[in-house]
Amino acid sequence: MHHPEKRSHNTSNLHCQCHVMRLFSLLNKAFNGIPSSSKLLLVFSLSGGGLVAYSESQSTSATNNTEVERLANKKKVVVLGTGWASASFLKDLDISSYDVRVVSPRNYFAFTPLLPSVTCGTVEARSIVEPIRNIVKKKNGEIQFWEAECTKIDAANKKVFCHSNIDANLVGKKEFSLDYDYLVIATGAEVNTFNTPGVVEHCHFLKEVEDAQKIRTSVIDCFEQAILPELTEEERRINLHFVIVGGGPTGVEFAAELHDFIYEDLVKLYPMVRDLVSITLIQSGDHILNTYDSRISSFAEQKFARDGIDVRTGCRVLSVTDKEVNMKIKSTGEYVPLPHGMVVWSTGVTTRPVVKDFMEQIGQGKRRVLATNEWLRVKGREDVYAIGDCATIDQRKVMEDIAAIFKAADKDNSGILNVEEFQDIIDDILIRYPQVDLHLQSEHLSSVTDLLNDPEGNAMKEVDIERFKSALSHVDSQLKSLPATAQVAAQQGTYLSRCFNRWEKCKTQPEGPRRFKGSGRYEFLPFRYKHFGQFAPLGGEQAAAELPGDWVSVGRSTQWLWYSVYASKQVSWRTRVLVISDWTRRFIFGRDSSGI
Amino acid sequence: MHHPEKRSHNTSNLHCQCHVMRLFSLLNKAFNGIPSSSKLLLVFSLSGGGLVAYSESQSTSATNNTEVERLANKKKVVVLGTGWASASFLKDLDISSYDVRVVSPRNYFAFTPLLPSVTCGTVEARSIVEPIRNIVKKKNGEIQFWEAECTKIDAANKKVFCHSNIDANLVGKKEFSLDYDYLVIATGAEVNTFNTPGVVEHCHFLKEVEDAQKIRTSVIDCFEQAILPELTEEERRINLHFVIVGGGPTGVEFAAELHDFIYEDLVKLYPMVRDLVSITLIQSGDHILNTYDSRISSFAEQKFARDGIDVRTGCRVLSVTDKEVNMKIKSTGEYVPLPHGMVVWSTGVTTRPVVKDFMEQIGQGKRRVLATNEWLRVKGREDVYAIGDCATIDQRKVMEDIAAIFKAADKDNSGILNVEEFQDIIDDILIRYPQVDLHLQSEHLSSVTDLLNDPEGNAMKEVDIERFKSALSHVDSQLKSLPATAQVAAQQGTYLSRCFNRWEKCKTQPEGPRRFKGSGRYEFLPFRYKHFGQFAPLGGEQAAAELPGDWVSVGRSTQWLWYSVYASKQVSWRTRVLVISDWTRRFIFGRDSSGI
């Protein structure tokens, strides 16, 4: 990690660091949706009763020489993507020492966990998007954004090639390339069709905002077609058969939303076909929501059974045509054709071609997913980082380093490790290898030194290298890659921006664990994911939640918890207000069923 | 006009006609957006302090014989379209004696006067639409609606042929036909390109909600393309040149909205191209808004000049390509090419092909627009009505009937009309020929009898047929066809539903004026348009309005008048709440510029 410049403080940020300013900056942050250059003059009364007037000052343009020089010396950071990972990274990044360029085919950030709600109009598409330029607006400089797709990363020449995908007949070259000193890949992943024939042509996906909007129109189309005069009842039934492939959180939430949309709103407008509607959820595993606690999984299955949603577990989809889903029941080997009105495909994600090509270049061609180290740096490159769904952290195994760890711990080079020596480096081990902690939890061990107990459970005062190896031999089995969720991506973005912001400082005062191979410490603490739990909204104002500390919560109150968490997690006050007012509107007026 | 059944009252509507019910029905009407079958239980306190609980009762299904018979005898009314005319007609129609079927390619009603606001996100598309099924929900029966386009009207066989335009791969026959006893054509008109080459391919229109959404995306695309790295300044300028063809109310309002969107919101996110943006408004006439009062027209021109909108009057567009608008300056004959980023075409409307074909069948093939009589019945057909933009009223001329009028008035057959005889039929004349009233106003005559004054202005006691003819000879010059506006269409819809509702009654007690040819009276009063004024929002919280009684109002307060009128005119409480909250949101957060 090489990074020569000293971070220069922007003086305009310093000249009135009083309490009032801090209070204002809090307010300002809270209302970051409000156009900042609109000569905002806020007069507010403090608790003391005084009045303070504040008018936003425009920083003078950088025309003096030192400023120009500083700009020229800035490291070029290119960021690909505007999803959770990228937005979190850019939001917190201090750009006083970086020249940041962002490229993405979407000029907005979307609050993707609400996508299933958009499919049925519970929340409007526009309420969950925020222009990326609003999010990355900075006081002390500018982040440039271009709406284009990165078509190739040239790792050797530190260059990315981009192509604007604006499909209008506008003039000017749509291709351009950017040089980078550091590249942050945050392009997300694409839908995994498992090469199932017909999926791309005949299925809806649920990845982008446009997907959700298309699904909404399509549901209404199915109803409008089903009630046309000349159809047989069988034809009406087929048009009103909604099939969802994939029993993960997205598929389940969509099934629940669709059920509510149909039975709370649509049947009132299309009462004549009420009894002809059916929803089928196809899951290849034995249970839906199988990454969740089994209590949630069975709660969801029971709820869906009551709702009349046909859950088909243990089934694999072989192909999809415009008329049918062809499915195989795994247990019996039987082939079942399901005529449908509409299919939504939601079975997980895979690597994008541009990332795949990059992996070939850097010797990761044989992997399925781009690998980074624990500091989110791409393996094999000094200057490329990857965050969010496009990459996975390749956690170093304890057993790979076991000899080095033993050697580092064995200060007196005696070949024997005593408990004191072990305790000396245990913190560094726990930081460097999070699987150790997970192992302790799963084995219900209260202290790390318990690891060194002999097979009978007696505490050992000393261990040799063989005993040490066998003591830690099961630890690596706890390794598990992180799920491809918004939560993980957002935490990675925030983590990486913190590293970029503290780079200068940490080079001289490293904050990471000691290096067992080599000397000294790592500059940064490795990335550690904090799981805040996960929700599964199940429709009818019912939700299930898995909360930290092995808590499981189901029912109506969980739905309200879901509302409050999702409202608080919005990126701007604008989207927060819109999402809450959408929910309110839905409670009062129901969902809109106009075919637009 | 033939219509045999007696209207039978739905008994379920009668059994508790107390004050409380009426109060509730008012409330219920006010909140007609609320799903009515959701077992709504409202408990509200009356002024007396008592509590009344009301639960909506489901009417029992019509299974007894008289009911079936009644249904079979109902006249079949087919309505084409779901715009202003159709929605107003259906909303007030009493369907107890009509079996009503509605066909339209849009399953929603759109509040079209707010379309220009949708183009720039001042108001969201969904806020101005209401599912037509919500609007036509009736207590005493069902109005059937099918989302399809009428492809042919077969006047001889009283049949319409329809084709569903749902473009999904859904099963079942998309074609169907409907028989009618009465047909109400309310399909509106289509954009008039005047056969200008390239308009259909390269211009945006502003007729449908989808058009407005496309314009919004396209504006953002122009900005995103203009800031790409590899463009020359000239290319950036071209991409940011917005051309509007047509200086009528829609074009002017769109220009104003676009100006506000760009200078209030977009330049903050794209500051680097601020000075490269330009807006050109092309008008073939000498002034923009030339159907308005000249004070409004010049106020608008001055406002646009200040805003930097380039208004090119007296110019005709010869062709449009993906890169250029080719324009001819009428006065000099000079040809001017205008390179553009985007063109919006808004130059008026013309007859749809299906209506044109129908006109051929009924002998109106040589006309430009479908003609109806003053009762909105299509000329040449007993059973077809046409309302809204698809038709025009062919007002009977006084001079065509002058002999019959004279004869009817001259009771004693003396060949001389005295003032008393004239006064006797003057009310019928004023009702039957509204142009007489307009003529009196334009000539500043205080009384109708002043018409009979001799050329020197002396009052005449008696006139012969020749004098009578010359007295009324200028009256018909006041004939003017009604503008193609929402206001006209809505009033026509309401008028026609009133006729349908009162048909039985008016057959025995006609309420119309006397027939000068033939005997007796017309069943109904002819349609009379009441002009409530018109607005021209000009951006920057400025608007101009032409109000009844020759009032003209311009400026900021007029914009607020505009807000309140447009809010009050919404078809449902849902859209009213949404539109107002969109305006509020825009004031606080600005318009959204995400490219979705």
Image: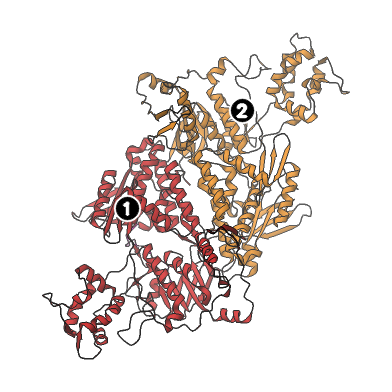
Chain colours: A red, B orange
- Label 1, label 2: how far apart the Cα atoms are: 58 Å
Q: Mark 2 is on which residue type?
A: Lys
Q: Looking at the image, which residue is at 45% across and 73% down?
A: A152
Q: Quadrant of the N terminus of chain A?
A: bottom left
The crowding category of the residue bearing disc 2, from other C-alpha atoms within 10 Å (few below 14, some 14 to 19, many at least 20), is: many
The crowding category of the residue bearing disc 1, from other C-alpha atoms within 10 Å (few below 14, some 14 to 19, many at least 20), is: many
Query: Number of labelled discs?
Result: 2
Q: Is residue A50 visible?
A: yes
* Residue A471: image location, x then y, percent: 18, 78
Element marked by disc 2: loop
Element marked by disc 1: helix
Please give left or right for residue A342 compared with residue B335 in the image. Answer: left
The range drawn in magenta is A185-198
Q: Is residue B179 visible?
A: no
Q: Magenta includes A190? A: yes
* Residue B2: image location, x then y, percent: 53, 19
Please give left or right for residue B523 compared with residue A374 in the image. Answer: right
Q: Residue lying farthest right?
A: B456
Q: Magenta includes A521? A: no
* Residue A231: image location, x then y, percent: 37, 38
Q: Nearer the viewer, mark 1 or mark 2?
A: 1
- Chain at numbered mark 1: A
Residue position marked by numbered label 1 in the rendering: A252
* Residue B587: image location, x then y, percent: 58, 52
Please give left or right for residue B392 compared with residue B478 in the image. Answer: left
Residue position marked by numbered label 2 in the rendering: B379
